[in-house]
Amino acid sequence: MIEASIHWLLSVLAVPEVGLTSVFLIALISATLLPLGSEPAVFAVVKANPDLFWPAILVATLGNTLGGAIDYGMGYAAKKAFHSERQTAWFRWLERFGPKTMLLAWLPGIGDPICTLAGWLRMPFWSSVFYMAVGKFLRYVFMTWALLSVTDGFGHWLATHMG
């Protein structure tokens, strides 16, 4: 039964009509502390339908920023439980540069914990979310453009050289 449910869910997420929904969900989940990359989903939707370049970028940015805001909330709530950790270098660095550090929220591996630490430090929420969104938006634009350029260029090169 579980296997059938998983196959059903995967088939629903693969349907072109819900491509942007899939992008949103994957971007949201990947922005939490769960290890999942959303760029391949954005790339797949855009590659299948180039007219969805900007909608896919915006939907991914929204989902990933919302995930970052969830990380922020987890950090905000966790502060009471781990007050002694406040003296680490990460905290001092984040306190020094403030919400602008959220521009780095797009970085793999450290971006999501930075969002969590921002909540822990109780940085201004809307400023943090704004900088998160800017960094994530720029990442999606660059990564999608780069993937499209590489795959299109490689396909053209391959077709040329293979006859």
Image (tube, rainbow, N blue to C red):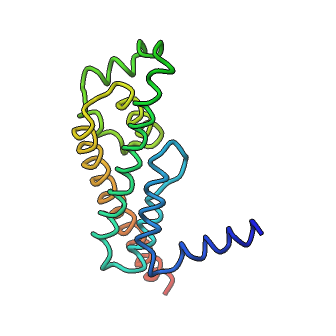
Q: Quadrant of the N terminus?
A: bottom right
User: 129 left or right of 42?
Assistant: left
Q: Residue drawn at (46%, 65%), measured in percent from left and top?
A: 41
Q: Residue furthest right?
A: 1
Q: Is residue 104 above or below residue 10?
A: above
The residue closer to the viewer here, 49 or 162, is 49
Q: Give the total of numbered labels.
A: 0
Q: Residue drawn at (43%, 57%), measured in percent from left and top?
A: 27
The residue closer to the viewer here, 70 or 159, is 70
Give percent across and percent down for residue 81: 51, 21
Q: Is residue 82 above or below residue 113?
A: above
Give percent across and percent down for residue 47: 41, 75
Give percent across and percent down for residue 55: 30, 70
The image quadrant of residue 61 is bottom left
Give percent across and percent down for residue 154: 43, 71
Q: Is residue 36 above or below residue 47?
A: above
Q: Is residue 141 above or below residue 101?
A: below
User: 47 left or right of 54?
Assistant: right
User: 32 left or right of 51?
Assistant: right
The residue closer to the viewer here, 143 or 133, is 133
Q: Residue drawn at (39%, 33%), measured in percent from left and top?
A: 114
The image quadrant of residue 97 is top left
Q: Residue drawn at (23%, 34%), measured in percent from left and top?
A: 100
